[in-house]
Amino acid sequence: MELTETRPFVPWEQMESFMIEAFKGYGVPEADARIVADVLLESDRRGIESHGCNRFKPIYIDRIVKGTLLPVTELQILKETPTTVVMDAHDGMGMVASYRMMEKLIEKAKTYGMAGGAIRNSTHYGIAGYWTSMAAKEGMIGVTGTNARPSIAPTFGVENMLGTNPLTFSIPTDEEFDFCLDCATSIVQRGRIEYYARAGKPTPSGTVISEEGEALTDSKEILERLVAGTAALAPLGGIGEELAGYKGYGYATVVEILSAALSGGQFMKALSGVDEDGKPKMYHLGHFFFVVDPEAFMGREEFKKIAGDICRDLRQSKKAPGQDRIYTAGEKEHEVWLYRKDKGVPVSEGVQQDIIKVRDALGLDFVFDFEK
């Protein structure tokens, strides 16, 4: 994978410090601000820019200002057993609630071999892979999913009913990077379309349909129509059954059920973020998490060795004509980090403008190289 970058970089330390101070400026406690900043930066470390600094202002800061995201996260444990936890995030920072949940589940799994948890009344929790990677760093398997604003149409439908609902796994290996599969159950997720819109790029044809059944490619129009409910994303596999779109539809439904039913939370149309008058309201998202400790099976080291062997065998298998490399999940993200770790966060013109707006609004004392 060849990596090149023409956008200016902001050093990791400077971007982290800026975001922490910015979130504090909007009422987020410092310890929580550090969690949120790290989740956003982890997206950019992995090259998942649709969920990184690109979303710092429009998704988090702007929602705090609008009142649809509370800066102080008041967590309530609704039920707890030796191997399970159910929390209510009371519309606070989804990242903070998820971090506290994973801390608990990892400790429970170390004792009992497995643990699972669910959160209701939450908000966007960043890249799902952050939470599963917390488990993988401890030598354990992590699984998570979250529901979201309605975006996906069911097979043979055109109405946005399900969220992009990622189903995510991190599996520790004996390599430099873990196996991490972190992807939406739609062909393209809303965050990617937001990225296209900010970059002035079209959305690939065939990934979004209008309520009339027509393909849409204008990214800004798509975002407007998704909110209005007059467009929907195609599930993995595409529209209809010919390319097995029912599989993506099925997995999206699994995530919706587990995210809502395990936590006793809300689902589908109730997660739109707007009321019957079209005014902003709380999102009330749900998330679920599972942690499995291989030590409770045949041991962590043997597990990691076999997992690594499987990944290596896949990468060393016969290549298609014209291809010289096969990847396994998490490998490309690792290479992005190796490329960026000494350079910093690449920031587009739109993100630069967001940074300046927030800095100036709060009167923060930061000067960035892209301003010079």
Image: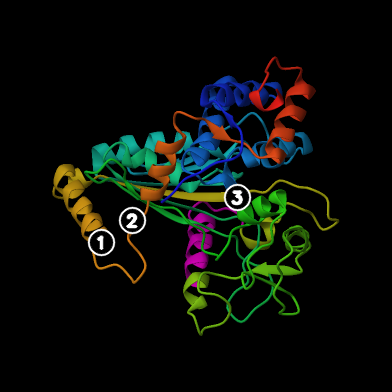
Q: Does the magenta stretch include residue 333?
A: no
Dot placed on the residue nearer the N-terminal end, 1 or 2:
1
Q: Which of 194 and 60 is in front in this view?
A: 194
**Tag 2, which secondary structure?**
loop
- Residue 93 is situated, as x and y percent measured from the top left of the image, at 60, 36
Q: Mark 1 points at which residue?
A: 314
Q: Mark 2 points at which residue?
A: 328
| Label 2 Cα crowd, 10 Å radius (few <14 / some 14-19 / many 20+) | some
- Residue 256 is situated, as x and y percent measured from the top left of the image, at 53, 61
- Amino acid type at mark 1: Leu
Q: Residue drawn 68% across and 52% down?
A: 194
Among the 4 quarters of the image, the one containing residue 11: top right
**Tag 3, which secondary structure?**
strand
Q: What whole-number distance in Å separates the C-alpha atoms at marks 3 and 2?
A: 30 Å
- Residue 81 is situated, as x and y percent measured from the top left of the image, at 36, 42
Considering every residue shown, the one lying at the far front of the view is 322
Q: Give the range drawn in magenta.
A: 250-266
Q: Residue drawn 62% across and 52% down?
A: 191
Q: What whole-number distance in Å separates the C-alpha atoms at marks 3 and 1?
A: 36 Å
**Tag 1, which secondary structure?**
helix
Specify whether 25 is left or right of 315.
right
Dot placed on the residue nearer the N-terminal end, 3 or 2:
3
Q: What whole-number distance in Å separates the C-alpha atoms at marks 1 and 2?
A: 7 Å
Q: Nearer the viewer, residue 146 or 58?
A: 58
268 relative to 109, above or below: below
Q: Name the residue under label 3.
A: 285
- Amino acid type at mark 2: Thr
Specify whether 232 is left or right of 321.
right
